[in-house]
Image: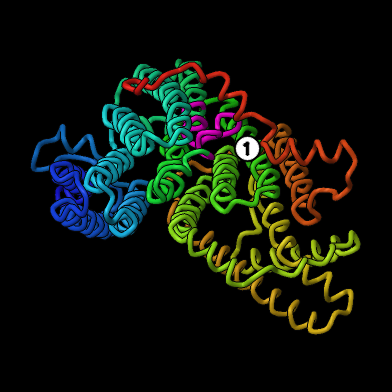
């Protein structure tokens, strides 16, 4: 069974790679061979990923010999994290490849695009099943290089080329960081086998190599931050809208999560790296807060989705930094599925909004409604958490995330609550309906939370006992998210004073971090770029 499971896990990247090679031989418009190869390859990859997941469910974490020898088997790891990510990537890959069949119908280079898409998916699959640093680092680099081909698919689109330039630079820095971290981990633990490194880190650590592991942890943080487009290196993510929609869907729904995956993969090492996780939490929280604030000023559907991804990636890394590893994995899955659907249906969303006509303005929210809405959200959240058994043994990180959840529920309830308190007609029924929706959403989320905690019972390290610094960090995060929640509810001040106008302009432009980055890389030319 071990051999079959590892072979099933190894097969999806091979299927995508074979499909990429075959599609590359038919690069023109409406390429029958390329489209057929892509359909068969993505379907086979998804079926084999499901088979690998089933074998994992029966046999548990696997790494070891295969019919091709012990060395090949050591390069693959099938555990909970790789199983979930492999299922996610192959499912999204099948959907996105199918979508691109119609989206690029008639494009003179449709076959080349399909080939690049399958090649990128092959690299991502290889990354998530890597059982050795000798596989993980090259797959990490290959994912970025394959994506670069897709970002520059239309060389005449100058904004896409500008985005690719910035992505290329940040990715190469991240590659160097990860390669250096891998070298330090091999020096500290005496092996490149990821399973052996994690087992040693969890049981006894690396005696006498604390500084080495700590430096490796900080390099992993830097690689993850650069991969997941954290502020202020996020600008390229907002500019890839010039690329075909399937590329945006694949990037925002899959590849951008690689930073979080990297931290989760080495979670046992990260808890040994003193201060690395708090730094990651601060960077993630800052990105989430800035992204959410800027999002309130955007009107373009795709740009709003881009800022949403920036904020969501920040929140995912915040969860990792607070030690909530199971919730970070749940966030990756939920956000990937949501964002893939959002991008692939973005054109329909615009048409739907236009068909509905101009919406009526929302009533202003009075400050007096804040407290009742927060109390109601707190009561709903606590009742749901108590029913799910999640109210005992929580640390500073879990408490901070619970407070953010309460604020999210309050944001959902506050406008119908204001309407009900104002005595508007039918407002009571609207509020009751929204209350039921909030309760149902909370029940679903807490149920998924409980299920993920049960599934990952031994997959990630337990949270450490929080100290004063952890509680201070949690308090700062909660207060910051509270301020942004108020901004989301009330919106920016509507006055016309010069200071307020400047604030709105600065916020809409993301405090010009992307412009500064443009100046930094403006003279840099991509390898092979046309003059």
Q: In the rendered view, does 509 fall on the left or right side of 95?
A: right
Q: Which residues are magenta?
A: 222-238
Q: In the rendered view, does 280 fall on the left or right side of 204?
A: right
The answer to which image quadrant residue 97 occupies is bottom left
- Do we see residue 195 in this rendering? no
Q: Residue at x 10, y 36 (%)?
A: 69
Can you say whether 505 is above or below 46 in the image? above
Q: What residue is disc 1 on?
A: 287
The percent coordinates of residue 154 (x first, y second) are 36, 38
The answer to which image quadrant residue 429 occupies is bottom right
The percent coordinates of residue 209 (x first, y second) are 45, 16
Asked whether residue 232 is drawn in magenta, I would say: yes
Q: Residue at x 82, y 40 (%)?
A: 501
The percent coordinates of residue 183 (x first, y second) are 36, 18
The answer to which image quadrant residue 499 occupies is top right
Can you say whether 529 is above or below 198 in the image? above
| Quarter of the image with the C terminus in it | top left
Coloring applied to the structure: rainbow
Looking at the rendered structure, the secondary structure element under dot 1 is helix
Q: Residues within 10 Å of mark 1 (few under 14, many from 20)?
A: many
């Amino acid at each position: 069974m071990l051999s079959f499971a590892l072979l099933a896990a190894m097969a999806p990247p091979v299927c995508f790679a074979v499909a990429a090679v075959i599609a590359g031989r038919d690069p023109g418009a409406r390429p029958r061979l390329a489209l057929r190869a892509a359909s068969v390859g993505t379907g086979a990859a998804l079926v084999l990923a499901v088979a690998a997941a089933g074998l994992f469910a029966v046999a548990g974490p696997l790494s070891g010999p295969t019919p091709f020898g012990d060395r090949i088997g050591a390069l693959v790891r099938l555990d909970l994290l790789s199983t979930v990510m492999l299922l996610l990537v192959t499912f999204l890959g099948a959907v996105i490849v199918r979508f691109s069949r119609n989206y690029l119908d008639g494009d003179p280079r449709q076959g080349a695009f399909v080939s690049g898409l399958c090649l990128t998916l092959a690299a991502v699959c290889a990354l998530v099943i890597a059982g050795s640093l000798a596989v993980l680092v090259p797959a990490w680099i290959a994912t970025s290089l394959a994506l670069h081909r897709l970002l520059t698919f239309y060389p005449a689109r100058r904004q896409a080329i500008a985005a690719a330039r910035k992505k290329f630079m940040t990715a190469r820095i991240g590659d160097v960081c990860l390669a250096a971290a891998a070298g330090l981990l091999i020096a500290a633990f005496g092996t490149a086998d990821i399973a052996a490194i994690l087992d040693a880190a969890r049981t006894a650590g690396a005696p006498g190599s604390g500084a080495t592991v700590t430096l490796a942890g900080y390099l992993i943080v830097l690689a993850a931050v650069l991969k997941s487009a954290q502020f202020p290196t996020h600008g390229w993510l907002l500019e890839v809208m010039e690329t075909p929609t399937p590329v945006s869907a694949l990037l925002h729904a899959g590849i951008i999560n690689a930073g979080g995956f990297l931290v989760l993969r080495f979670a046992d090492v990260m808890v040994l790296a003193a201060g690395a996780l708090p730094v990651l939490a601060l960077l993630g929280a800052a990105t989430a807060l800035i992204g959410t604030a800027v999002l309130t000023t955007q009107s373009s559907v795709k740009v709003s989705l881009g800022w949403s991804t920036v904020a969501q990636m920040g929140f995912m890394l915040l969860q990792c930094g607070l030690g909530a590893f199971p919730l970070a994995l749940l966030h990756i899955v939920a956000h990937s599925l949501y964002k893939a659907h959002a991008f692939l249906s973005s054109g329909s969303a615009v048409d739907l909004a236009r068909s509905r006509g101009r919406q009526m303005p929302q009533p202003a929210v009075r400050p007096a409604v804040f407290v009742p809405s927060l109390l109601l959200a707190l009561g709903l959240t606590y009742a749901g958490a108590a029913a799910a058994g999640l109210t005992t043994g929580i640390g500073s990180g879990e408490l901070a995330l619970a407070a953010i959840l309460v604020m999210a529920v309050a944001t959902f309830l506050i406008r119908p609550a204001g309407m009900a308190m104002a005595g508007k007609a039918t407002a009571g029924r609207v509020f009751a309906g929204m209350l039921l929706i909030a309760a149902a959403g909370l029940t679903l989320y807490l149920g998924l939370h409980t299920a993920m905690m049960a599934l990952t019972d031994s997959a990630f390290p337990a949270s450490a006992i929080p100290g004063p610094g952890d509680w201070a960090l949690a308090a700062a995060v909660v207060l910051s998210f509270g301020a942004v929640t108020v901004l989301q509810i009330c919106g920016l001040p509507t006055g016309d004073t010069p200071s307020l106008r400047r604030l709105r302009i600065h916020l809409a432009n993301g405090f010009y971090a992307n412009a500064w980055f443009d100046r930094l890389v403006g003279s840099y030319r991509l390898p092979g770029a046309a003059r």
